[in-house]
Image: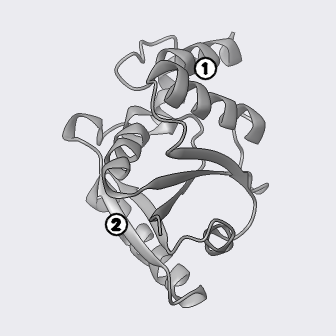
Amino acid sequence: MSKIAIYPGTFDPITFGHIDVIKKSLKLFDKLVVGVSDESNKDYLFSSYERIEIVNNALFKDLKLNKKKIKVVSFGSLTTDLCKKYKSNIILRGLRAVSDFEYEFQLAGMNRKLNQNIETIFLMSDVENQIISSRFVKEIVKLKGDIKKFTTKSTIKSLKDKYE
């Protein structure tokens, strides 16, 4: 039986921090489902459809990662429901800094209360990518700064197209 992990997030846009977590997870799990949240109460720069396209382009066109091991999907449900849909008992979360931990710890606890069979695994991106956040990447590109060190070529193009 294959081990499937769910990596939920907004990915607005995907960064090298997210990609680090994805690459590390591929060493641990047989398959990864990247769940792009389409929760309507958040203010996204990109629509759910655009974010899925950006993630697909970054992972499969820019980085040439294995399409057989990664599935990118949109979801508007509880993450625990997404786990059930893809027969996974593992939620993968990325940690950048200690400040992320409290929120992520609470989230993991709530998911555990919703489904006792689900485990949350935390992975850290490499040191050089721990400071990267989607919010800062958007702000830098909006102010016409260089974001080559933070995300992939196709994502940069999508961001520039959005702000021009």
Cα–Cα span, label 2 and label 1:
28 Å
Q: Is residue 44 something that shows in the picture?
A: yes
Q: Horizontal and vertical percent for residue 69?
A: 49, 45
Crowding at label 1, few (<14), some or many (≥20) Cα neighbours within 10 Å?
Answer: many
Q: Horizontal and vertical percent for residue 125?
A: 29, 45
Which mark, by number, is residue 59? none
Q: Is residue 48 left or right of residue 2?
A: right
Q: Residue furthest left?
A: 127
Q: Nearer the viewer, residue 143 or 88?
A: 88
Q: Residue furthest front?
A: 1
Q: Earlier in the sequence, mark 2 or mark 1?
A: 2
Q: Horizontal and vertical percent for residue 16?
A: 39, 33
Q: Horizontal and vertical percent for residue 82?
A: 66, 67
Question: In the figure, 18 relative to 7: above or below?
Answer: above
Q: Nearer the viewer, residue 16 or 84?
A: 84
Q: Which residue is mark 1?
A: 159
Q: Number of marks in the image?
A: 2
Q: Which residue is mark 2?
A: 101
- Residue at 54%, 36% in the rendered image: 67
**On-image quarter of the C terminus:** top right
Task: Give the amino acid at mark 1.
Answer: Leu
- Residue at 53%, 44% in the rendered image: 70
Kind of element beneath mark 1: helix
